[in-house]
Image: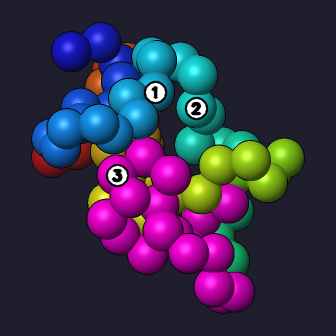
Amino acid sequence: MQPGAIQCTRANKVLPLPGVLDHREFTRVRTDLGRCDVCDDGRAVFRSADGRVKLCEKCYGRLVRAWNMGKGVSSG
């Protein structure tokens, strides 16, 4: 899998293209945003700067890890 790609485990879910979503453009919010736009499973807690994409903790974490791997940062 390429850095920036989020692997989807459920059928009929959105699979963002590598490099399309940048974790630095997301902000944690306290308001109820509904469901995650990527997995449609988790509660969305991050919103993109333009307000078009909402992510849950799990998908945001995957996005950050993929970006770190692309930059050569190891997680442990």
Mark found first going from the N terminus, 1 or 3: 1
Q: Is residue 23 left or right of residue 60?
A: right
As drawn, 24 above or below 36: above
- What is the span of residues highlighted in magenta in the rendered image? 30-47
Q: Examine the image and state in which quarter residue 24 appears.
A: top right
Q: Secondary structure at mark 2?
A: loop
Q: Secondary structure at mark 3?
A: loop
Considering depth in this image, is 32 or 19 the residue closer to the camera? Answer: 32
Residue 39 magenta-highlighted: yes
Q: Marks 1/3: CA distance?
A: 11 Å
**Mark 3 neighbour density, 10 Å: few (under 14) some (14–19) many (20 or more):** many
* Residue positioned 57% across, 43% down in the render: 23
Q: Nearer the viewer, mark 2 or mark 3?
A: 3
Q: Which residue is mark 3?
A: 39
Note whether residue 6 is visible: yes
Percent coordinates x, y for residue 64 in the rendering: 42, 43
Q: Is residue 6 left or right of residue 32?
A: left
- Residue type marked 1: Pro
Residue that protrudes farthest toward the top in the picture: 2
Q: Which residue is mark 1?
A: 16
Q: How is the image coloured?
A: rainbow
Mark found first going from the N terminus, 2 or 3: 2
Tell me the number on the disc at residue 21.
2
Q: Are marks 2 and 1 in contact (CB under 8 Å)?
A: yes
* Residue positioned 35% across, 69% down in the render: 42
